[in-house]
Image (tube, rainbow, N blue to C red):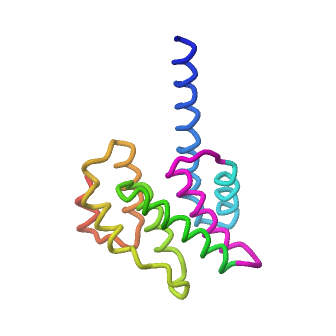
Amino acid sequence: MKLFLSLITAFIFFFQSDLEALRNSYAKANQSNANTEAFINLAEKQSGSDAVINGYKAAAQIMEAKIAKKNRKALVKTGATSLENIIKNNPNNIELRVIRLSVQENIPKIVGYRGSMKDDKAFLINNYSKQNATMKSYVKKFAMQSKSFTDTERATLK
């Protein structure tokens, strides 16, 4: 029994560290092409069926279009479709909403993938207080640098 509990605990810590590494890498991905590539490589190495990790993988596909020479449109379409499906199956996951909002904020307007920005921002504001400390910190950090949030909206995230 102790062995079983130890294995579960080790798995949880291993999984958490991967997710934390993804979050940190994603936050830095738009700063440079090297950071974008590092995030893409980290996301591609992830396995499993966790919705949040798959959300980051979908974002990585979309971001790959930024540095790719060919098939840019296909990368965006595949990544966006995947992200939309993940959110459709997990509509109350705040981290997935952060991912989609950040992607839509940073993608060129001409691409046309910007339809959920108002809904996602409203979802983040309305569900912020229900989150654990880690998620509150992540959402607040995103909102502080986001172009979508006003100073008044940022102030509501305490």
- Relative placement, left or right, of 129 versus 37 is left
- Relative placement, left or right, of 11 versus 147 is right
Residue at the far top: name it.
2
Q: Residue at x 62, y 71 (%)?
A: 78
* Residue 123 point in image, percent of width and height: 30, 63
Q: Which residue is drawn at 58% across and 22% down?
A: 7
* Residue 140 point in image, percent of width and height: 35, 55
Magenta stretch, main secondary structure class: helix
Q: In this view, does 50 lie above or below 126?
A: above
Q: Which residue is drawn at 53% across and 25% down?
A: 8
- Relative placement, left or right, of 139 versus 50 is left
Q: Which residue is drawn at 49% across and 64% down?
A: 85
Q: In this view, does 117 lie above or below 18?
A: below
Q: Picture quarter containing residue 151?
A: bottom left
Depth check: give the residue in front, 51 or 104.
Answer: 51
Q: Picture quarter containing residue 82?
A: bottom right
Is 134 inside the magenta-drawn segment?
no
Depth check: give the residue in front, 142 or 74.
Answer: 74
Residue at the far right: name it.
69
Please state the extent of the stretch shown in magenta in the rendering.
46-71
* Residue 18 point in image, percent of width and height: 59, 42
